[in-house]
């Protein structure tokens, strides 16, 4: 279980100054990368914890998950926490990279208030890095008569992708493919109206595995570049239903839903839209135009 019993703020951090509420949290589950998962050296991975807001404060974009000790594994010093009302659960994710050194590695993180007072249990990621090269069993074909060598069936091929996702070409990274099926424009979502000159852009995203194992898709890996070259990232509160959320898809399955952002409502910015996908915060983005 990725949690320690410590529920107090580190002594070097200031005492919480929130007068009207009490922040607290409870570890619920490891959504990805259970403790002791064995990974290859320098393997990129997404760690996700499910946590519950057990305090009386509402978490918003000013609440952060901070790295406090151990091995950061290439992660950022801090990351935003999804919005959550008291009693609700949220999934906090980090894009990390397994260290190059073999052995056991652990990094510790904790939620903190806007005033930098940490609360709740320490959340940790603990992995083992295995040898990068495994011994391979070989057969001496020269000592075996060709006539007696058994015929080999061809390797099963992965399912071919459709020509396009619908509104965009597929972006393929490793065993994952991502594309836009539909596009929608709205001036109001979830009861929130935009000011004049702004508009919601929603993309119906489809993510699917291209290999024989399951894979994870995250809305935080997606952005849109508008016609002015400005980059727009995912919104948390204003989302078109059903939303494209953190999802694991197995072979033959898909992760799909609406991904929403906000852009200036001008002809130039609404033309020449580009889908940007960053399969990891440590890798270069992949891009494809979005047809309208």
Image (spheres, rainbow, N blue to C red):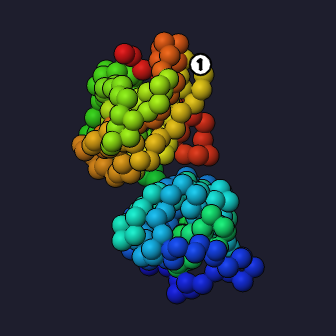
Q: Is residue 154 above or below residue 83?
A: above
Q: Nearer the viewer, residue 108 or 25?
A: 25
- Dot 1 corresponds to which residue? 228
Q: Nearer the viewer, residue 184 or 86?
A: 86
Farthest front residue in view: 20
The residue tagged with tag 1: helix, strand or loop?
Answer: loop
Quarter of the N terminus within the rendering: bottom left
Quarter of the C terminus within the rendering: top left
Q: Is residue 55 above or below residue 291?
A: below
**Residue in the image at 63% along x and 76% along y:** 16
- Measured as percent of width and height from the top left, residue 8 is found at 60, 84
Q: Is residue 34 above or below residue 252?
A: below
Farthest bottom residue in view: 5
- Measured as percent of width and height from the top left, residue 172 is found at 44, 33
> Is 99 positioned to the left or the right of 209 in the image?
right
Q: Nearer the viewer, residue 247 or 163?
A: 247
Farthest right residue in view: 12
- Measured as percent of width and height from the top left, residue 82 is found at 47, 57
**Residue in the image at 67% along x and 79% along y:** 15
Would you identify the image quadrant in which residue 124 lies? bottom right
Is residue 40 visible in the rendered structure shown here?
A: no
């Amino acid at each position: 279980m990725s949690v320690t019993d410590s529920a107090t703020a580190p002594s070097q951090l200031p005492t919480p100054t929130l007068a009207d509420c009490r922040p607290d949290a409870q570890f619920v589950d490891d959504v990805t990368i259970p403790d002791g998962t064995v990974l290859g050296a320098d393997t990129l991975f997404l760690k996700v914890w499910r946590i519950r807001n057990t305090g009386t404060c509402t978490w918003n974009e000013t609440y952060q998950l901070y790295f406090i000790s151990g091995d950061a594994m290439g992660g950022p010093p801090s990351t935003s926490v999804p919005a959550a009302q008291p009693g609700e659960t949220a999934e906090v994710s980090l894009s990390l990279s397994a260290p190059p050194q073999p052995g056991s590695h652990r990094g510790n993180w904790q939620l903190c208030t806007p005033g930098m007072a940490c609360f709740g249990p320490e959340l940790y990621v603990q992995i083992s890095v295995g040898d990068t090269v495994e011994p391979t069993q070989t057969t001496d074909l020269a000592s075996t008569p060709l006539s007696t060598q058994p015929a080999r069936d061809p390797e099963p091929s992965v399912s071919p992708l459709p020509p396009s996702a619908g509104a965009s070409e597929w972006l393929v990274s490793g065993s994952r493919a991502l594309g836009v099926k539909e596009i929608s424009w709205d001036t109001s979502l979830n009861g929130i109206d935009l000011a004049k000159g702004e508009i919601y852009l929603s993309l119906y995203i489809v993510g699917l595995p291209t290999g024989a194992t399951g894979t994870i898709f995250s809305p935080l890996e997606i952005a849109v570049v508008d016609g002015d070259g400005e980059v727009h990232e995912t919104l948390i509160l204003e989302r078109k239903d059903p939303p494209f959320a953190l999802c694991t898809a197995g072979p033959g399955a898909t992760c799909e839903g609406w991904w929403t952002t906000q852009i200036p409502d001008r002809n130039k910015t609404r033309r020449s839209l580009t889908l940007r996908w960053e399969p990891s915060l440590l890798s270069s983005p992949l891009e494809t135009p979005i047809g309208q």
